[in-house]
Image (spheres, rainbow, N blue to C red):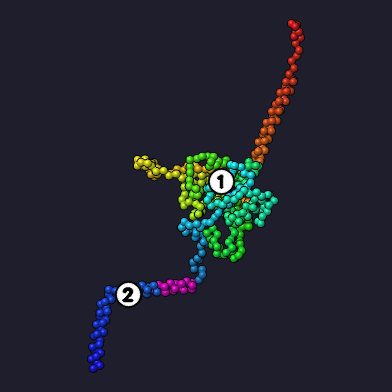
Amino acid sequence: MAKKRRQQAEPVAEKIDVESEEVRPGGGGDEEEDEDDVNDEVLSSEEEEDDDDEDDDAPSSERPSVVPMPSAIKSTIASSDGRYHNRQRLLVLSSRGITARYRHLLEDLRSLTPHSKKENKLDVGKNYSGGGAGGGYGAAVNEIAEVRGCHTVLFLECRKRGQDGYLWLGRTSHANDYPSSPTDEVDGTTTTNAPSGQKKRLMISGGPSVKFHITNIHTMDELKMTGNCMRGSRPVLSFDDSFDTVDHLRLVKHLLVDVFGTPRGHPKSKPFVDRVMGFYYADGKIWVRNYQILEETASTAKEANVHKKLTGHAHSTSLIEIGPRFVLNPIRIFRGSFGGQSLYVNESFVNPNVIRSMKKKEEGDKYVRRKGAERKRKMRDESIVVPKDPLSDVFR
């Protein structure tokens, strides 16, 4: 009886297996593929572990050296997301005693730099020495920049009752400070080598900085150009080829980019570009111009076709000057902020005081020559004596 029961139970089990096999092709194949994928992943992971073990066993000379990429380089290589990462701020101020022309120029520069911070006129003595090295305007400007949190500065200094104007551009000592927290960001890069609660400076006096003699100033209101741009728009900075070949101009170019380049995503800036700021080097001076980018489309299809044949584009792009315009004559480039070691000295620069003294001397020479001519004429008149005529009394 037991043998019969076993024989009857075996066909039933076979039927169940057959039915299960008939049902699996519709849905069980995916499970097999999933199991195969999992097995492949496990095998690949085991192979990678074996490769890692072999690399560990290999000598260090044969291993490829992996150098971590600095965060600053990563930020430049990575595509920009349009956010406000470059939190660079500009301090714009002037000395006391500037004239109306310099004051209007400063207002124009403030309108062109939405990332700037306005400060009152600075009036300090030569004997002033703040917390940092040096004295005079340099120490005061660095203190103000540290309080306002500015990294670059544009300082307009006037002398001789507004006759001479000097423009200072540079990076302040605050720009080279590490933050108090070891994981804070400075200019988009994270610093971890500075101890917490302390500040570490790349340079004690900040810098570099450059001093210009500014001439040929024409403001926006004075020029009355037809060009116009949106207030707060970001500019395209255009530089002459000389800024890539001349040594001292290469450094000046970086300072001009830091000062006049509006950071992307700044709250006060507009998210588009509609003007060009040009810097051209000629006669040993830097000529600064500001233009509007104007794009015009043809009114008719015929004009668009003709223009496309001539230029290759259906629309025309032109530049219209906005202003202001001025000329910068570089005098000296300092390693620090408003002082320090001289990196460059312009030997061809002549102080305006010397030019004025030479003009006064020429005017004095003219006076001396005129007075000498008067004395010679008087002596000549005295030397001419007409002899007395003996017949002058005959007909009287």
Question: Magenta stretch?
Answer: 43-58
Q: Residue at x 76, y 8 (%)?
A: 393
Principal secondary structure, stretch drawn in magenta: helix
The x and y percentages for residue 243 are 54, 48
Q: Nearer the viewer, residue 349 or 394?
A: 394
Q: Quadrant of the C terminus?
A: top right
Q: Position of residue 73 (x, y in %)?
A: 51, 59
The residue at which mark 2 appears reads as: 32
> Can see residue 349?
no
Q: Quadrant of the N terminus?
A: bottom left
Task: Give percent across and percent down for residue 141.
Answer: 62, 52
Give the alpha-carbon distance from disc 2 to disc 1, as whole Å: 75 Å
Q: Residue at x 47, y 43 (%)?
A: 319
Local crowd size for mark 1, using a 10 Å CA cut-off: few (<14), some (14–19), many (≥20): some
Residue 339 magenta-drawn? no
Horizontal relation, residue 283 to residue 80: left or right: right
Name the residue: 25% across, 77% down. Answer: 22
Q: Is residue 311 left or right of residue 369?
A: left
> What residue type is disc 1 on?
Glu
Relative vertical location of residue 59 with respect to residue 235 in this rendering, above or below: below
For label 2, the crowd category at 10 Å Cα-Cα, with few meaning under 14, some 14 to 19 and many 20 or more, is few
Relative placement, left or right, of 394 versus 6 is right
Q: Which residue does the image show at 57% across and 64% down from the upper left?
A: 181
Residue extending furthest toward the bottom:
1
Q: Which label was assigned to residue 198?
A: none
Residue 107's mark?
1
Question: Which amino acid does the dot numbered 2 rest on?
Answer: Glu
**Callout 2 secondary element:** helix
Is residue 18 depicted above or below 299 in this figure? below
